[in-house]
Amino acid sequence: MREGRISTADAVGVPCLVDSGLLHPALDDPGRLEPVAPVVALHRLLRSAEGRIAEERRRETRLTEMFEPLIHLDGRRTESAADTPGSRLLDGNQRIDSAITDAMTEASKEVLCIQPYTVRKESYARPLARQRDQTLLDRGGRIRTIYQHTLRHAPDIIAYQEHIAKPAAALGSESRAQLGCLIARSGVLDPDR
């Protein structure tokens, strides 16, 4: 570079010099590369940076246009989860089951849930869950549940589904065993509310 030229073979290890426009083939010897004038190189690099910045600005504009309808929604639907009364972080089996029972008492249309399998379900929570689910079904609500795929033949899951199958099927309720990973219990009640 100090000599004003470099062979193409020597530049193979640093292709970024050619790619970024700092070196170009010499007019009198195509086997050699020579540096681009610093003013020209700076101008090209700045133009490239300006192009990337302009594309990011266009992206910002597109995102703003896409989110604009959501910005004007009712504040209850757009607050953070910490500020929203319908979203709570709970810990402990009794607090969680109590919150689920309260929420399902208010639900009228649909419950969407993802259920992990726990031994606790067999002994403690299964009767409570059956009662909650049956009460919702009796009110005309529907339940859609996704279980881990390893539970498709679990006897207590099969027995539970058979217990609520007829009324649930009549209302369009579903139960699927499709998840291939362990997850935490999650639920959405009356999603359009």
Image (cartoon, grey):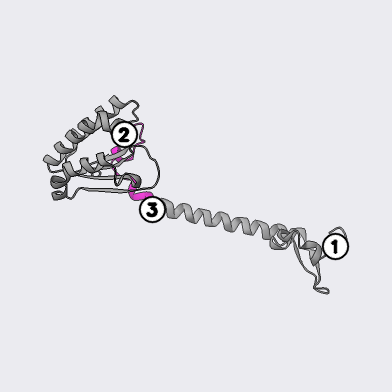
Q: 36 or 192: which is nearer to us?
A: 192
Question: Which residue shows up at 25% across the image and 30% down it?
Answer: 125
Q: Which part of the image, by quadrant, shows the N terminus?
A: bottom right
Sequence-earlier tag: 1 or 3: 1
- Distance from Cα at disc 3 to Cα at disc 2: 25 Å
Sequence-earlier tag: 3 or 2: 3
Q: Which part of the image, by quadrant, shows the C terminus?
A: top left
Q: 56 or 183: which is nearer to us?
A: 183
Amino acid at the residue labelled 3: Met
Q: What is the secondary structure assignment of the residue under circle 1? A: loop
Amino acid at the residue labelled 2: Ser
Sequence-earlier tag: 1 or 2: 1
- Distance from Cα at disc 1 to Cα at disc 3: 51 Å
Q: What is the secondary structure assignment of the residue under circle 2? A: loop
Q: What is the secondary structure assignment of the residue under circle 3? A: helix
Question: Which residue shows up at 38% across the image and 53% down it?
Answer: 66
Q: Residues within 10 Å of mark 3 (few under 14, many from 20)?
A: few
Question: Which residue shows up at 29% across the image and 29% down it?
Answer: 96
Q: Above or below — where is 50 with respect to 166?
A: below
Q: Which residue is mark 2?
A: 87
- Distance from Cα at disc 1 to Cα at disc 2: 67 Å
Q: Which residue is mark 1?
A: 4
Question: Which residue shows up at 38% across the image and 49% down it?
Answer: 67
Q: Which residue is mark 3?
A: 66
Q: Give the residues drawn in magenta, as a range.
A: 67-87
